[in-house]
Image (cartoon, rainbow, N blue to C red):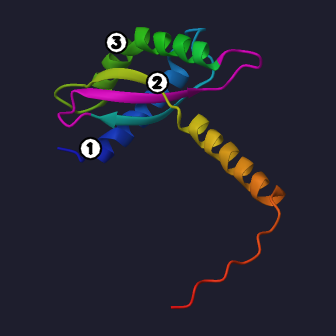
Amino acid sequence: MQRPEHLEDQLHFLLSTLVQRELRDPELGFVTLTAVRLSSDRSVAKVYFTVLPVSGGDQEAQDGFTRKALGRAAGFLRSQLASRLKMRRVPELRFFPDGTLEEGNHLETLLSEIEKERAARPADPEVEAPEA
């Protein structure tokens, strides 16, 4: 039996290759699979994805279209995994948009705003510590 991390990496590689080369759904757009996480009993694989944003498009709607397209392809992807992997039971595939990039950008924006406020504030005179 393989370690879960190794199996997740293997699933990630195979799924990425299959999505890139085998799926022909126009709603997929430019999708990238970012991670695969298996449940403890290995019956469910959570597959995280990002979509290259289209200028002027709604990112949430685009994520929704992509999630539906990947959901429609889940049976095909699972059957392809079964033919390529040595597993008794191929996990059920569930797809989720990966929000880590947006969260990182949001944190970066907050940190830059804090830095701007700190730079705009006049320098405080040093407060002397009380002697004990």
Q: Residues within 10 Å of mark 3 (few under 14, many from 20)?
A: few
Residue that mark 3 sits on: 75
Q: Main secondary structure of the magenta part?
A: loop
Q: Quick check: is 57 in the magenta stretch?
A: yes
Mark nearer the N terminus (2 vs 1): 1
Residue that mark 2 sits on: 18
- The location of residue 4, given as percent across then percent down, is 26, 44
Residue that mark 1 sits on: 4
Mark nearer the N terminus (3 vs 2): 2
Viewport quadrant of the N terminus: top left
As drawn, 78 above or below 87: above
Which SS class for mark 2?
A: helix
Mark nearer the N terminus (3 vs 1): 1
Q: Is residue 61 left or right of residue 113?
A: left
Which span of residues is magenta-colored? 39-58
Looking at the image, which is closer to me, 72 or 1?
72
Which SS class for mark 3?
A: helix
Q: Residues within 10 Å of mark 2 (few under 14, many from 20)?
A: some
The amino acid type, in three-letter code, at marker 3 is Gly
Mark 3 or 2, closer to the camera: 3
Q: CA distance from mark 2 to mark 1?
A: 21 Å
Quadrant of the image occupied by residue 62: top right
Looking at the image, which is closer to me, 100 or 2?
100
Mark 3 or 1, closer to the camera: 1
Q: Residues within 10 Å of mark 1 (few under 14, many from 20)?
A: some
Q: Is residue 16 left or right of residue 107?
A: left
- The location of residue 101, given as percent across then percent down, is 59, 38
The residue under the point 33% across, 21% down is 93
